Amino acid sequence: MNPYIEEEGEIKGGPPGWKPKTALGKKVASGAIKNIDELMGYSSPIKEVEIIDTLLPDLDEEIIDVARVQRTTDSGRRMRFRIVAAVGNRNGYVGVGKAKGKEAGPTIRKAIEKAKLNIKRVKRGCGSWECGCGELHSVPFRVVGRCGSVRVVLFPAPKGAGLVSGDIARKILALAGIKDVWVHTEGYTRTSINFAFAVLNALENTNKMKIREKDIERLGIISGAVQDDR
């Protein structure tokens, strides 16, 4: 239930104290954009985290990686935190963000905010030839994602197979609402940042393949969230 939307579907104004500065923010606050699916129809980048807090108030958060990095300066070595975080509603929307800072707490919050601003819509379905149940438990087809030297391939898996992947990919896939998938990786996957963004890129690429109408129905494909009235 969205606390910022009234029964008629109008936005009350977003989080307390929010004064929208961008065109998208003003449309969300006024009720011109009523849900996240409508927002994804705009080409303008999301620059206010309150937009996502308003349209997706039920996001779950995961810390993907916490690392301490050092930089040598004239005054000596300076230690900083590097955080990778992910957010998702477990229903077709997921985002990944990274941040650096001197203190862990503020840096984590910054990484989560960046993940919200980097939210992506994911296409789900039952693409496994071993299954054919037509439910939204996997990816609808083989899809590839890249970031740096890392290449990630997601293969549709039958219902009950689970998320056959490493811990980083498993967290991001679960936040997107994917329950069954096989993951193949190439490159230097120990680089957590590149690995996380490669998984996100693969999920984003589910929207780039054109699918015939009969296959959409057969595979039970839906892009984004399943609405309550479905």
Image (cartoon, rainbow, N blue to C red):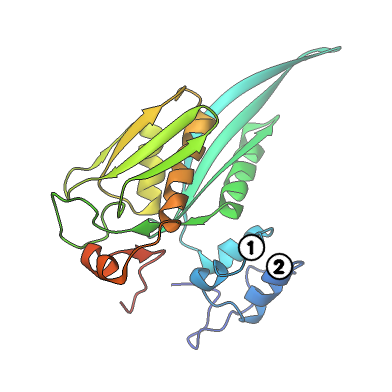
Q: Position of residue 4 (x, y in %)?
A: 56, 74
Q: Position of residue 117 (x, y in %)?
A: 61, 54
Q: Residue drawn at (49%, 70%), measured in percent from left and top?
A: 37
The amino acid sitting under disc 2 is: Trp
- Quarter assignment of residue 165: top left
Q: Residue 56 or 203: which is nearer the viewer?
A: 203
Work out which residue is located at the far bottom of the displayed protein and give it. 8
Cβ atoms at labels 1 and 2 below 8 Å apart = yes
Q: Residue 143 or 16: which is nearer the viewer?
A: 143
State the residue position of label 2. 18
Crowdedness of circle 1 by 10 Å Cα count: few (<14), some, many (20+)? many
Crowdedness of circle 2 by 10 Å Cα count: few (<14), some, many (20+)? few
Q: Residue drawn at (28%, 59%), measured in percent from left and top?
A: 125
Quarter placement of the C terminus: bottom left
Residue 51 sits above or below residue 117 on the image: below
Q: Residue drawn at (55%, 30%), measured in percent from left and top?
A: 148
Q: Residue 70 or 223: which is nearer the viewer?
A: 223
Quarter placement of the N terminus: bottom left
Q: Position of residue 27 (x, y in %)?
A: 66, 76
- Quarter assignment of residue 137: bottom left
Residue 117 sits above or below residue 56 on the image: above
State the residue position of label 1. 50
Residue 124 sits above or below residue 20 on the image: above
Q: Is residue 151 left or right of residue 134?
A: right
Earlier along the polypeptide chain: callout 1 or callout 2? 2
Mark 1 residue element: helix
The amino acid sitting under disc 1 is: Glu
Q: Position of residue 214 (x, y in %)?
A: 25, 70
